[in-house]
Image: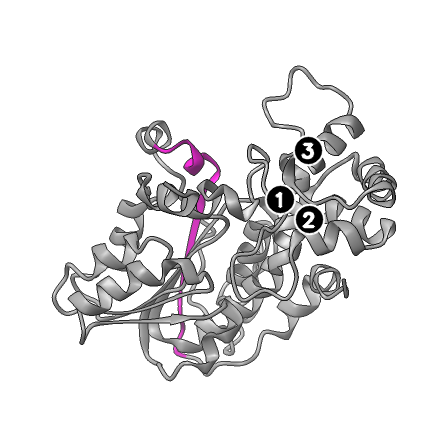
Amino acid sequence: MNNLTSSLELPHFPVMLNEVLKISSPSTKERFIDCTFGGGSYSKQILKFSKTNVLGIDRDKKVLTEAKKLEKKYPKRFKFHQLKFSQLETISIDNVDVVIFDLGLSSIQLNDFDRGFSFKSNKKLNMTMGLNEITALDVINNLSESDLKRVIKILGDEKEASKIAKNIVYHRNLKKIENTNDLVKIIEKSKKKNYSSKINPCTKTFQALRIFVNKEITELIKGIINATKKLKPGGKILIISFHSIEDRIVKYFFTNFSKNKSRPSRYSPETKVPDTALFEQYKNKILRPSNEEINENNRSRSAKLRFATRSKNNFEYPTDLINKFKNYLDLESINV
């Protein structure tokens, strides 16, 4: 049995499914976009309601088999496109009721050791989610030491990024770094031992490389802008994030482009509400997985669900969002 087959056969747990269904209300809504189709868990549950229509997108071609099954089962109600978030605007669909994003790495991708996402595997460095221009192999062996340091420090929040980057360059000058185990050894030798930490010493570096390879921050920003364009007045956008950079972007977008933008905190004086707000009043409420769900699916423990409701105002491009996170966009645009 190959790794792909085994990864697909492992149980796939849709994160915060009950909360997503409660907020999205498929019993009363019709048009949905599932922006991270993956194993199809959200789409399958939504399609159980007879009036729903779902457009599924995913950049990963390895989900095509599952997507085709749904297209066959619901030929008039489900369509799938292999696309990145940034390409959502190319699809002719408007007046959408609900858009759902479940960010980060799926269990299917992580469990497929051949893709090199996991530091527990000893496979070729890859880390591509699909429709990529570069791989982790390219990054590790070609990016300058200074750029490697920036990627690992900024995207992984790794305090020892400088030493890790220096040792990567040293070892690649001796021999090309080709597999995950080679990289794991370099990282472990670079970091001070912290016996009290529950986090694997490789976690942050692997996260940083994965984000950079897939341009995840760029895709997220372009994706949520494109999704907002597609929403009808009163439509909802739901986003489940798993690390602080993602959540910071989502929070900023929902807060600063909503009707409560003019009053960012209860201590600030109230000013005139702008009539260009993309979203209705945003409550800045974060939903988290239940203890029961975390016990069943430990990977859900860091999940945060935020949602916002589209206003009746015409869409105006949120330039401030781009400017606010320009440092991440510039970092991900570095040539390898």
Number of the front mark, 3 or 1 = 3
**CA separation, marks 3 and 2?**
18 Å
> N-terminal of the two: label 3 or label 2?
2
SS for dot 1: helix
SS for dot 3: helix
Label 2 sits on residue: 155
**Residue 149 point in image, percent of width and height:** 81, 46
Residue 157 against residue 220 in the figure, above or below: above
> N-terminal of the two: label 2 or label 1?
2
Residue 327 against residue 8 in the figure, above or below: below
User: Callout 3, which amino acid?
Assistant: Val
Given residues 117 and 220, the one toward you in this image is: 117
Q: Which residues are magenta?
A: 297-312
Label number found at residue 207? 1
Furthest residue to the left?
A: 50
Residue 264 falls in image quadrant = bottom right
Q: Is residue 286 among the parts visible in the rendering?
A: no
Label 3 sits on residue: 184
User: Callout 2, which amino acid?
Assistant: Leu
